Structure formats: structure tokens, C-alpha cells
Amino acid sequence: MSDIEELQSRIMTAMDRIGQGVEALSSQPVAVDSSELDALRTALDEEKIVTAQLEERIKKLKAAHAAELEAAKPAADSAGPDRLAALDSELQRLRKANDQLRASNAALREANEAGVGEPHLINSAMLAELESLRATRATDMAEASAIMDQLLPLLDNARDLPAGEDT
């Protein structure tokens, strides 16, 4: 966008200079070739048309950009509650697995203190620990997925912007 604005500025400056030249030629009593004057007026009119076209293009680009942002916003907002519900579900699973792990480890400690090493308690503790690890991983994945769902629309929008343009 800054390139377009820079070009627009340069065109406006050129048009001003051409306008000043036409005024200077019109106010001078010096005989001016009418074909040269017509050529300058034609050039001025062409520059005005180009400027109007560039201004219209800038308006369309800004409107398209605003529309894209508005279109991306509901998608990001609608994905958020679903992902948060999934994340909450995984957190509940993690809490339950950790509670099981604590209970199993407490029973294993009591059996070891009593001098009775029961294999089913060891197996139960191992299974609880595995479930805890799985739940932790699932929670991490749900959290990462929720973050990605929020970032992807922003990244897609940033990728579509021309180089050097700020939002």
C-alpha cells in the first residue's frame, strides 16, 4: 500500500507542476504553440484519470482487507468455544488420572511398608501412571490445537498482505 501511496503522491506532485506550468503559460503574453498547450492539458487530464483510478483501487483494497478480517473473525470465534470445551475435557481427564495415580501409589507404599509386594498393585500403579502420561499429552495437544485455531486465520491474513504493508 505504501508503494501505491508513494506513486499517488508523486503523480499529485507532477500534476501540480503541470498545472502551474499551464497557468504560467496562460498568464504570459508570450505566444505559445497551441499544440504544445493542448499536449500539456492532455497529459494533465491523463494524470488526473490515473490518480482517480489509483484512489479507487486503494479504496477497494482497503474494503477487501476489512472484509477479509471480518470474515476471519467469526471463524476464529466459533472455533474457540469448541476447542476450549475439548481442552476442559482433557483437563478433567488429567485430574482424574492424577488422582488414580496418587491413590495407587499410596496403596503401593502401604504394601511395601507392610513388606508385602503385591504385583497387582505395581501393575495398577504402572497403568495409572501411563494413563496420567496419556492424559497429559492429550491436554497438551488440545491446548496446542486451540492456540493454532486462533493463530491460523491471523497468519493466513498476514500472508495475503503485500510485502511491506502493515495492518
Image (spheres, rainbow, N blue to C red):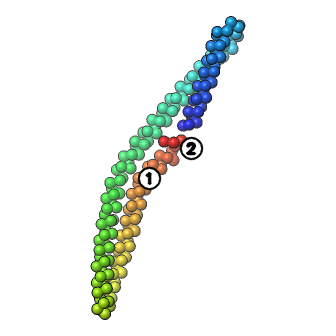
Task: Please tell me which residue lies in front, 164 or 80.
Answer: 164
Real-space Cα separation, disc 1 to disc 2, in angstroms: 20 Å
Where is the N terminus found, in terms of image quarters?
Answer: top right
Residue bearing the label numbered 1: 151
Q: Quadrant of residue 49?
A: top right
Q: Secondary structure at mark 2?
A: loop
Q: Amino acid at mark 2?
A: Ala
Q: Do we see residue 30 in this rendering?
A: yes
Number of numbered discs overlaid on the protein picture? 2
Residue 38 appearing in the image = no
- Classify 58 as above or below 39: below
Q: Is residue 123 above or below residue 49?
A: below
**Which residue is pictured at 32% across the width and 89% down the height?**
112
Three-letter code for the amino acid on which mark 1 is drawn = Leu
Above or below, 31 against 62 in this view is: above
Residue pictured at 38% horizontal, 67% vertical: 138
Residue depicted at 45% across the width and 52% down the height: 152
9 displayed left or right of 130: right
Residue at the extreme front of the image, as rendered: 113
Mark 2: give few (<14), some (14-19) or many (20+) Cα within 10 Å. few
Q: Which mark is residue 163?
A: 2
Are dots 1 and 2 in contact, CB under 8 Å?
A: no
Q: Residue at x 34, y 85 (%)?
A: 122
The secondary structure type at the circle numbered 1 is helix
Q: Position of residue 84 (x, y in %)?
A: 33, 57
Question: Image quarter for residue 23?
Answer: top right
* Disc 1 crowd, CA 10 A, few/some/many (<14, 14-19, 20+): few
Is residue 98 rendered to the left or right of residue 43? left
Q: Is residue 11 left or right of residue 97?
A: right
Residue 149 image point, x, y percent: 41, 54
Q: Which mark is first along the chain, 2 or 1? A: 1
